[in-house]
Amino acid sequence: MKKVISILMAACLLLSLCACSGGTTNDDAAESDNKENVQQSQTDDVETTDTEDYEVTDLMGRTVTIPGNADAYACIGPGALRLYCYVADTAELVGVESVEQEWGDDGRPYNMAIPNVDELTVIGPGGPGNAPDAELLYVAAPDVIFSMYNSEISALDELQEKTGIPVVALSYGNSEVFDTAIYDSLSLVGQITGHGDRAEEVINYMRNIKTDLNTRTAAIENKPLVYLGCQSSRGSHGIESTAGNYALFDALNIRNAAAKAGIQQYAMIDKEKILEMDPDAIIVDAGGYQILCDDYSANPDFYNSLSAVKNGKVYMQMPYNYYYTNLEIAIADAYYIGSVVYPDAFSDIVMEEKFDEISNFFLGIDSYQRIADIYFGGYQTVNLEK
């Protein structure tokens, strides 16, 4: 009934909104596996909600009034749809941003898990630097918009005022993995969509993973010095791209070479600094692997001077930042890093199986092989000479 009302009201908006463009949809249907996934379990745990409106506090500290009978949702901005997919029912999405169709599912398992994603209504452009489309959102008529588009309260309030639809801000926090802001966001999505039990299940799973990583590694003595290279940050980079506050290293109690050298955050550093560090092992992100290989061809003496290269201890992790953080890939990366840095402590881990176990929990799909096919065959020891 509310859908009919929304459709009738859409005509008014088309006359009142300025500089609006026509809505578009993608009619090219893509083949999609009809897998049994977490969406079924999410449907099973729907909680009974009051029909009265209620208030929530979003991750920007805004008080937002939510309709008690909400059952249709939109997700805008980097990472919002992913958090939704971990918890709620994709059948209740009114549409997706156009980038979810244009980019395909490469590197984003949540997109792989959405049935017939290419057939869904387009609710806006998505992608970096593009503002939400108030008209398309209004016409799509979600009951709630989950947003990761803007960190400015005024921008969120403006979108809410233009559309007349509650806008709820989510967040990944500062560390992007194992962050309380992620837990709070998942809990909020669960509360609003009626999937609170599923949200708690995901939160507890992540907390248990963090505990497991710490339990395996905290008491290990004589920990090796490890350097993170080729870290993706607004694009792909070479060996100079690193971070002293790398969440996965922190979770594994790893001696971070960058942190030991006084680097506290993400940084592009001079190669001479890496020579001074001379780490025991190097983890490289597959997103920058080709840059690494090209640089090795031009500067083999630099790389061959590093102990990690000489000793065959350069390892490739999978990229997990693509339209924000793929939590399932990041967690799998943590197990992989643990398995190569502390092989005895992770001797029970078979990475292909572990990756799919994690992916299945979060999204109900096996995704390791598809990710590995994109990124040079997956987890591996890197031989720069080949």
Image (tube, grey):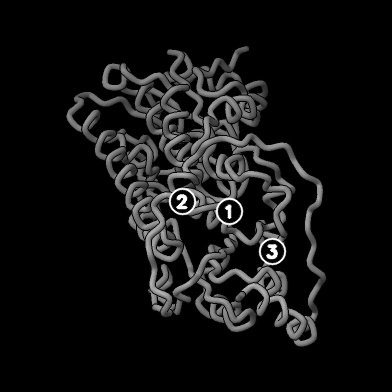
| Circle 2: element type | helix
Q: Give the mark nearest the N terminus, 1 or 2.
A: 2
Considering only vertical position in the picture, is 6 above or below 177? below
Viewer-proximal residue among 217 and 326? 326
Q: Which mark is residue 123?
A: 3
**Residue at (60% x, 45% y) in the render:** 114
Q: CA distance from mark 1 to mark 2?
A: 10 Å
* Type of the residue with mark 2: Thr
Q: Work out whether residue 181 can be spotted.
A: no
Instruction: Find disc 1 in the rendering and name its residue.
Output: 91
Foreground: disc 3 or disc 1: 1
The percent coordinates of residue 296 (x first, y second) are 62, 23
Q: Position of residue 209 (x, y in %)?
A: 31, 38
- Nearest to the observer: residue 152 or residue 143: 143
Q: Quadrant of residue 354?
A: top left
Q: Which residue is mark 2?
A: 43
